[in-house]
Amino acid sequence: MKKKIRFVLLLAAICLVMLPSLSGCENATTRANKTDYWGTIKKRGTVIVGLDDSFVPMGFRQKDGKLAGYDIDLAKAVFRLYGIKVDFQSIDWSMNTTELRNRTIDLIWNGFTITPERKHVVAFSNTYLNNDQVLVSRKNQNITSLQKMTGKTLGVQSGSSGAQDVDRYPQILKNRIKDKAPVLYDGFNDAFIDLNANRIQGLLIDSVYAGYYIKHEKNPAAYREIAGPFAQEQFAVGMRKGDVTLRKKVNHGLSVLYKNGTLKKINEKWFGDTAKVVKQPQN
């Protein structure tokens, strides 16, 4: 009985020690979600953007190590309107909202898809680009439909909207594939290496990435893209819910760039057309 009493007292003591720490974490998160940091950003003259630096063509490292991409050009163009520089920080994509909450970054701007799950934790800008999830395979695998993935190994990027779609609609792919679970990758580059080596037979991926990557392969005809029945996605900029002013600035910037033709030029540079461009509300 005495041992039981001592255990209960010890447990209570641990809880008392932990409570302030847990409360502090909760308060920090609450403050981050309620505070408008535009004044801080403007004062330092730099906004910090988090990205997966292997996401071609949205944001990626070139052979010389320099960052390039659609979202790189777009973010710079938006903040050039306000005389603010953009500091791009490479992050673990599966931890993007945590980085935002911890204030190590100010924005998630890297082909960031609006989803119901993400809406709970971040605020989104207006949509600027449409996207779809497609299944990429090598033609020699004879995968001509999603049904043909039965018993095959599927790859997805960890924390991506594609990974969420696999879980959200299990009857489409999850219940068919080997082990009823996809192989998770930190980036699409490694996934394509495994696809080419037949370690996976299909890759669920953003159409913007798939189209650009395959186009720049030595033999683009070796690949097959299959459109999935998933809902069309919208790319937007993610930020803390308290950053109301920052959201207004980003939305206004996108509107200006759409109106003056800059958004069109960026689309033509990276995609060769403007089919995926979303018309911006004029503020």
Image (cartoon, rainbow, N blue to C red):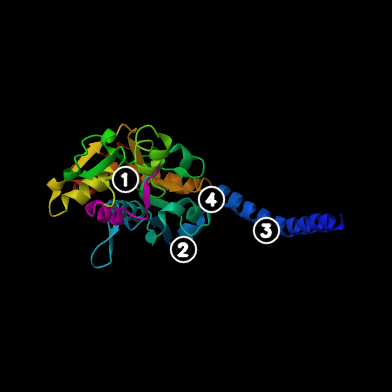
Label located before the other in sequence (4 or 2): 4
Which amino acid type corresponds to the residue marked 4 in the rendered image? Asp
Mark carried by residue 36: 4
Mark carried by residue 153: 1
**Cα separation between marks 2 and 1:** 48 Å
Q: Quadrant of residue 187?
A: bottom left
Nearer mark to the viewer, of 1 and 4: 1
Nearer mark to the viewer, of 4 and 3: 3
**Cα separation between marks 4 and 3:** 24 Å
**Cα separation between marks 4 and 2:** 15 Å
Nearer mark to the viewer, of 2 and 1: 1
Label located before the other in sequence (2 or 1): 2
The residue depicted at 42 percent of the width and 48 percent of the height is 159
Q: Viewer-proximal residue, 265 or 180?
A: 180
**Cα separation between marks 2 and 3:** 30 Å
Image x and y of residue 155, in percent: 33, 47
Range of residues picked out in magenta:
181-198
Mark carried by residue 162: none
Q: Which residue is mark 2?
A: 44
Above or below, comparing residue 153 to residue 39 in the picture: above
Mark 3 Cα shell of 10 Å, populated few (<14), some (14-19), many (≥20)? few
In the picture, which quadrant includes the N terminus?
Answer: bottom right
Label located before the other in sequence (1 or 3): 3
Please say whether residue 160 is visible from this viewpoint.
yes
